[in-house]
Image (cartoon, grey):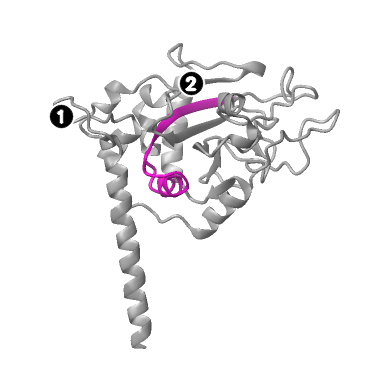
Amino acid sequence: MSTPLPPAADTIDAFERDGYAVIRGAITPGLRGQLLTAAEKLLASDITQGRDRGGDGKDGFRGCLNLDRAFLPLLANPAVLPTVVQLLSPNIHLLSAHLIALPSGPPRTIRVPGQHGWHRDMYGVTADLGASHTPRMAIKAAYYLTPVTPDCGLTMLLPGSHRPAQEPVVPAGDIDPRGAITPDITETDAVVFENRTWHTGGINLSGRPRIALMLQYGYRWLHPVDDPATELRNDAALTSIEQQLLGLPDRRPDGSLAKGSGAVPIRAWWAARSMASVSMVRNYRGLESDR
């Protein structure tokens, strides 16, 4: 893993206020091209493992990291992971790596009045605990691989909807609640949003599929949505942080229980990063006092 970028204070502030934030320059154009090539290859295949076909012609895959290692650079993306850790904690792993292809054309059965598609993630939590008792448990990082245009159907969000307990009201005959927005992003940015933030897929009228990758991170005591990445996690080339994100168990080498050991890689990395940040601040203050 390359050197992590510190989360910008305005990114954290925006997330706390709105329930989402934009991370600029989260991927390079070169990596984006590689991701798109891998995504199109998967979508054109007849693979059924993790295949996720939905309403209105959607196609995609759950657990795409298991299907092509070209997606692996996003797992511990140094431009995104520090923000996720600061907003949750080091005790996290990957819940889902979702490849989504949204076809172009007017919607037929979803995103129409009466079936607007607005939702929170992890719906079972709200059903079991109630909206007012649902905590922040997971964060998604969304990357868009096809051209970002005003009509490409980017994921829409409702700012501030992570806080109120009530479901947002969609006016009769409409498909969006008041205040809904489409994030202003470029093709190398990532959008991060939490499980309580109301969102929906936009309407794609661009003339080509909108292809996105959405990686969801959550606490290690949450069960992943994807199939276990057992084979991938045994790859000796993976860093310890990547191994944790793929489900490192709380075990010693002999198989005995070691509570919390599965979170040691990110916890140690985060502590070292925090100490380095404190040292930098102290050095800066020392320089200021010498002037």
Say if mark 2 contacts mark 1, CB within 8 Å.
no
Expressed as whole percent of the image width and height from the top left, the position of residue 142 reads: 52, 37
Horizontally, residue 288 falls left or right of residue 170, namely left
**In magenta stretch: residue 132:** no
* Residue nearest the observer in this picture, 152 or 2: 2
Residue depicted at 33% across the width and 73% down the height: 282
Horizontally, residue 182 falls left or right of residue 145, namely right
Classify residue 194 by image quadrant. top right
* Residue nearest the observer in this picture, 240 or 123: 123
Question: Can the viewer see residue 132?
Answer: yes
> Does 277 appear above or below 210?
below
Which residue lies under the disc numbered 1?
253
Q: Secondary structure at mark 2?
A: strand
Q: Amino acid at mark 1?
A: Pro
How much space separates mark 2 and mark 1, taking CA atoms?
A: 33 Å
Q: Secondary structure at mark 1?
A: loop
- Crowd band around label 2 with a 10 angstrom C-alpha radius: few (<14), some (14–19), many (20+): many
Classify residue 154 by image quadrant. top right
* Residue nearest the observer in this picture, 129 or 247: 129
Q: Which residues are magenta?
A: 76-101
Residue depicted at 70% across the width and 43% down the height: 181
Give the residue furthest to the right. Answer: 172
Expressed as whole percent of the image width and height from the top left, the position of residue 208 reads: 62, 28
Report the label total: 2
- Crowd band around label 1 with a 10 angstrom C-alpha radius: few (<14), some (14–19), many (20+): few
Question: Can the viewer see residue 154?
Answer: no
Say the numbered circle drawn on residue 61.
2
Residue depicted at 63% across the width and 23% down the height: 103
Precedes in sequence: disc 2 or disc 1: 2
Quadrant location of the C terminus?
bottom left
Expressed as whole percent of the image width and height from the top left, the position of residue 139 reads: 50, 38
